[in-house]
Image (cartoon, helix red, strand yellow):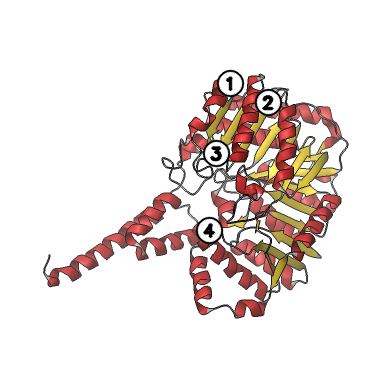
Amino acid sequence: MPPLQYIQPIFYTIIVLNAAAAFVTVFRDRNRDIAATWAWLLVLIWLPIIGFIAYAFVGRKLPKNRLFRLRKETQIRLEQMIQRQREALGTELMPADAVTSSVRGMVSLFLNSDGALLSRKNRVKIYTDGHEKFHAMFQDIEAAKNHIHIEYYTFYNDQIGNELLHLLERKAAQGVDVRVLYDPWGSMGTFRSFFKHLEELGGHARPFLGAHSAILDFRLNFRDHRKIVVTDGRVGYVGGFNVGDQYLGRSKKFGYWRDTHLRIVGSGVFELQERFIRDWNATDAEHRIVPDVNMFPVIRVKGNTSLQIVSSGPDSDAQQIKLGYIKMIMTAQHRLWIQSPYLIPDDSVLDAIKIAAMSGVDVRIMVPDKPDHAFVYRATQYYARELADAGVKIYYYNNGFIHAKTIVIDGQVASVGSANMDFRSFKLNFEVNAFLYDADLAQELERIFLEDQKISSLITVQDFKNQSFWLKFKQTFSRLLSPIL
């Protein structure tokens, strides 16, 4: 045991070395958001060993050589397919100036920031119950003749996961081209061996960007949070449901699972198809997809929905979905209703919501009344308290767990997809949303919100004031970590 007079210098030396290592670790990434930079400094300095372990899981950037490298010939082929559809469908794929002035700015925003085509005359159905969503999706997969493309953040090795896998195996045995893209972290416990028989039958399954397991790819950030299904280039699914028993209400922890998902029939499927092809080819260059007419068929349906499929992720600095959220918030004149399991907005989104509320817009935000991640939930409560002070009506959903990611404004425009109202979805994960320009669908989502509101609790400013000091402390501390949650 060293003499007492040596302990203090050793202790100070460790503190100085740890602080120096923290500064070098954080500031070597010059493009990191300043809020995240200071949050990581706080963690690394105050939690010397634990902080660096956490940084290894959460803080590291995705190497540029693992970001999207789309082969030139594939890009050209995709552009040719999309151009073919535009020529064949004529007025069903239209420029921004062909829509009403109230949404023209939003359409232009997505065209300029993401190249997202405006698709018209789609048939769109909303699902809020997992049993109904999976029943419809299984029917569409069963009917597929040419290809099935599936991309999920979570694909669990459980009852519903095995039911879907066996269905895909049957289709692969029939000669249908089956491809599954999954995130290994979100699909914790699902290994490559789970898909072995599918691949023996001619199907393909890959972990996103080539990671083989959550253990080997120990990074919480830059996950594939998208949920995409495309069958025969004609039917597409996008929304919040993953593949797992908990999404069917089979988890005692969460109870009933309330989510929102879309089934799209029409030219809007093209953008989901293109997104999947890009993600697949970035992951597996050896078995890359060469787009053909079977993946982009000319389809005409009698629908009323105009929409844009918008993607965002760490492969772009544009934060396209976040910009869309801000545009919706600032466009709202009467009503702005939001559902999200996580409410951790950055300053730009937070200010936009406050401005809307203080301008007289009826702003309502619904979040769960129970946590699935402790720090995230406490940070959500902090921002809910801050927004309540600005006049926002905060509702805690009481009938299980609400996982829906929806925004609807004035009963005219809506967004449904995978992106939460938080830093992670804005900057750190790969996301996809459908922005819907259809009054009937928007009003249906409003009716769904009102039904959910009946089984939710309105949390008033006084309710937040009455919270204990310890609870407020946990909320405030979690808020300090919000840029990295």
Would residue 111 be visible to someone looking at this image?
Answer: no
- Mark toward the start of the polypeptide (3 vs 4): 3
Q: Position of residue 13 (x, y in %)?
A: 22, 64
At 48% from the left and 63% from the top, the residue drawn is 481
- Mark toward the start of the polypeptide (4 vs 2): 2
Spatial separation of the CA atoms under disc 3 and disc 4: 22 Å
Nearest-to-viewer mark from 3 and 4: 3
Residue at image mark 2: 147
Q: Is residue 450 left or right of residue 481?
A: right
Q: The residue under label 3 is which amino acid type?
A: Asn
Residue at image mark 1: 202
Q: Decide: is 166 above or below 457.
A: above
- Mark toward the start of the polypeptide (3 vs 1): 3
- Mark toward the start of the polypeptide (3 vs 2): 2
What is the quadrant of residue 135 in the picture? top right
Look at the numbered disc 1 and give the secondary structure of its residue. Answer: loop
Spatial separation of the CA atoms under disc 4 and disc 2: 37 Å
Look at the numbered disc 2 and give the secondary structure of its residue. Answer: strand
Disc marking residue 157? 3
Nearest-to-viewer mark from 3 and 2: 3
Q: The residue under label 1 is which amino acid type?
A: Gly
Spatial separation of the CA atoms under disc 3 and disc 1: 20 Å
Nearest-to-viewer mark from 1 and 2: 1
Look at the numbered disc 3 and give the secondary structure of its residue. Answer: loop
Residue at image mark 4: 373
